[in-house]
Image (cartoon, rainbow, N blue to C red):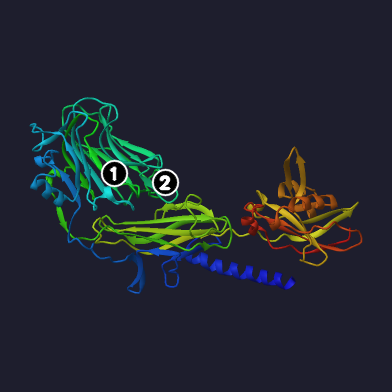
């Protein structure tokens, strides 16, 4: 045990010497300042990596999204479905009988289940419009497989556009729906005209592996007049998890669909139920006119009529937006409750690509795959103070290409600046003050560290050999009152001598007997990490005693047991 103590003291000296040198290079006022860096050669470790590769550029490692091929067959694929109602073959009377209707279905790729409305040509419409005037009027469509309406695995960007007019004020009149029922729950979305406002509702539509939003909505702020057309546009941006509603080009509301409800929270992914084959329904249960509809897998301009509005739009085969992630290994600092000051990282996110760095820490070891519901990640901005504490920490990096997948963000390195929180120094000049009536009093020089003076404690060990403890006295007293345990520690302010004798000033006096040993023994039996046999002291047997100091970071929790000092010198007592 003595040899182990010498090794421990030598290790402490070596550690202090290293950290003094480190602090010079880090320009840190703290003796125990340090840096952890991900990105320099030899430190490119990670727990998992998805769609990201690390390559060397000019000798330095850089993380980028992997290159990925364009979408396979078909060679030409629509991003959006447009309905302009300018062709009469949408009428139920002609669908299935007209060559033009067959051509339309083949071109657009959907099945017309029902098309029942009155075609009108008002002066404020773009060409012709559909008028829904009676209860039976509705347009039921099975959308093409490439549209987000048929995506069951998670949707990226999407847009919904309606040029719409309402004939009268209504309450919760659905002008659009795409939902089904499974297990007694509704899944999907709907557009609603309610009290002169337009809103979109979502039912069990946004989720991740751990949570789901049962119902949410986004509504216009401006009230709408009847008998005039409005351009209503809904955008969902997958790279930030935001829903934005526009009315005639003016933003009405913006919602971040994340776990926290804030911009940089973990994004909940939109998706339809995996067994849902329900059609998209337009115009049912409302009185009004729909002039134009666009269902799109991309973010549309706020005035889509300036583009390919009213006709089928096709684009050449192109890559899709790509996502990637790096999940770091759980790293360890030397001591619990160390101060994590700030995180710096270098990289680029050009042309609307996205680079985000997240961080989490704890004093107890956690698995790399720890759910965020248990220990959430926190988004960090490079160079800003975060002032967190912990011994174990982990990074996560999210990367996303631009909207067409042609440009990737890059990450060069991540640096963590921290200050260790080491245990206090060992108490000095331990001596026997007196032995009387079965009580032992020990005296020693008080520790001058502020985190021992303010909130720290002293503990006593004893055994029949030096530094081989048979018992440990944690508490000065333990009282059980009405099922409540009241514990008192040995500490600076209560046990410091105030004697006028200069030889006793700045000394700590600790008194103990067999009764106190037994009280401590009863308490620590239920805490294996604190347990010692704690035999009672027998007269005429010599015992070795020594003391330690713990700082304000020490706690009975196993994670904080590392805030105890090295032992003092020993003294021999014969009770």
57 left or right of 314 in image: right
Can residue 222 be seen here? Answer: yes
Which quadrant: the N terminus?
A: bottom right
Tell which circle, 1 or 2, labels the residue nearer the N-terminal end: 2
Provide residue 474's location: percent of width, then percent of height. Answer: 74, 53
- Mark 1, Cα crowd under 10 Å, few <14 / some 14-19 / many 20+, is some
Q: Is residue 437 left or right of residue 195?
A: right
Q: Which mark is residue 259?
A: 2
Image coords of residue 462 (percent x, y): 80, 60
Callout 1: SS:
loop
Q: Which residue is mark 1?
A: 278
Viewer-closest of 447 and 345: 345
- Regarding residue 311, the answer to whether it shows in the image is no
Q: Residue at x 28, y 65 (%)?
A: 68
Kindly indicate the quadrant of the structure image that contains residue 171: top left
Report the front residue among 149 and 276.
Answer: 276
């Amino acid at each position: 045990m003595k040899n182990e103590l010498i090794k421990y003291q030598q290790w402490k000296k070596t550690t202090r010497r290293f950290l003094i040198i480190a602090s010079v290079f880090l320009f840190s006022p703290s003796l125990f300042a340090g840096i952890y860096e991900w990105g320099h050669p030899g430190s490119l470790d990670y727990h998992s990596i998805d769609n990201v590769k690390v390559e060397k550029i000019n000798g330095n490692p850089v993380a980028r999204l992997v290159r990925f091929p364009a979408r396979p067959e078909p060679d030409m694929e629509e991003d959006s479905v447009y309905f302009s109602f300018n062709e009469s073959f949408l009428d139920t009377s002609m669908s299935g009988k007209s060559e033009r209707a067959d051509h339309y279905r083949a071109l657009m790729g959907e099945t017309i289940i029902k098309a029942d409305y009155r075609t009108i040509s008002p002066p404020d419409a773009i060409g012709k419009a559909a008028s829904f005037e009676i209860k039976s009027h509705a347009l039921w469509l099975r959308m093409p497989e490439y549209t987000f309406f048929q995506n069951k695995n998670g949707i990226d960007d999407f847009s919904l556009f309606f040029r719409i007019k309402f004939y009268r004020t209504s309450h919760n009149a659905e002008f659009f729906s795409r939902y089904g029922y499974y297990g007694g729950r509704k899944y999907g979305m709907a557009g609603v005209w309610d009290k002169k406002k337009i809103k979109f509702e979502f039912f069990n539509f946004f989720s991740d592996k751990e949570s789901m939003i049962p119902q949410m909505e986004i509504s216009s702020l401006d009230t709408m007049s009847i008998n005039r057309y409005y351009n209503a546009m809904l955008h969902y941006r997958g790279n930030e998890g935001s829903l934005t509603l526009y009315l005639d080009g003016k933003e009405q509301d913006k919602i971040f669909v994340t776990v926290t409800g804030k911009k940089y929270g973990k994004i909940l992914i939109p998706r339809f139920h995996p067994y849902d084959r329900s059609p998209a329904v337009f115009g049912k249960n409302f009185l009004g006119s729909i002039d134009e509809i666009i269902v799109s897998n991309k973010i549309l301009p706020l005035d889509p009529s300036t583009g390919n509005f009213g006709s089928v739009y096709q684009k050449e085969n192109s890559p899709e937006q790509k996502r990637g992630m790096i999940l770091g290994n759980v790293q360890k600092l030397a001591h619990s409750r160390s101060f994590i000051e700030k995180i710096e990282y270098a990289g680029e996110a050009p042309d609307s690509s996205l680079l985000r760095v997240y961080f989490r820490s704890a004093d107890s070891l956690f698995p790399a795959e720890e759910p965020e519901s248990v220990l959430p990640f926190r988004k960090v901005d490079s160079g800003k103070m975060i002032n967190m504490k912990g011994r174990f920490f982990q990074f996560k990096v999210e990367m996303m290409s631009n909207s067409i997948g042609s440009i990737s963000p890059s990450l060069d390195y991540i640096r963590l600046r921290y200050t260790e929180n080491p245990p206090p120094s060992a108490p000095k000049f331990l001596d026997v003050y007196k032995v009387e009536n079965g009580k032992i009093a020990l005296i020693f020089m008080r520790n001058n560290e502020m985190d021992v003076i303010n909130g720290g404690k002293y503990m006593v060990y004893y055994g029949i050999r030096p530094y081989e403890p048979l018992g440990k006295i944690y508490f000065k007293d333990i009282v059980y009152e009405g099922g409540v345990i009241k514990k008192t520690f040995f500490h600076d302010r209560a046990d410091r001598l105030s004697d006028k004798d200069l030889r006793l000033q700045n000394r700590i006096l600790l008194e103990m007997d067999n009764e106190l040993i037994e009280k401590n023994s009863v308490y620590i039996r239920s805490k294996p990490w604190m347990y010692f046999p704690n035999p009672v002291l027998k007269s005429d047997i010599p015992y070795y005693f020594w003391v330690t100091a713990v700082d304000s970071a020490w706690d009975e929790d196993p994670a904080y047991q590392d805030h105890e000092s090295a032992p003092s010198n020993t003294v021999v007592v014969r009770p």
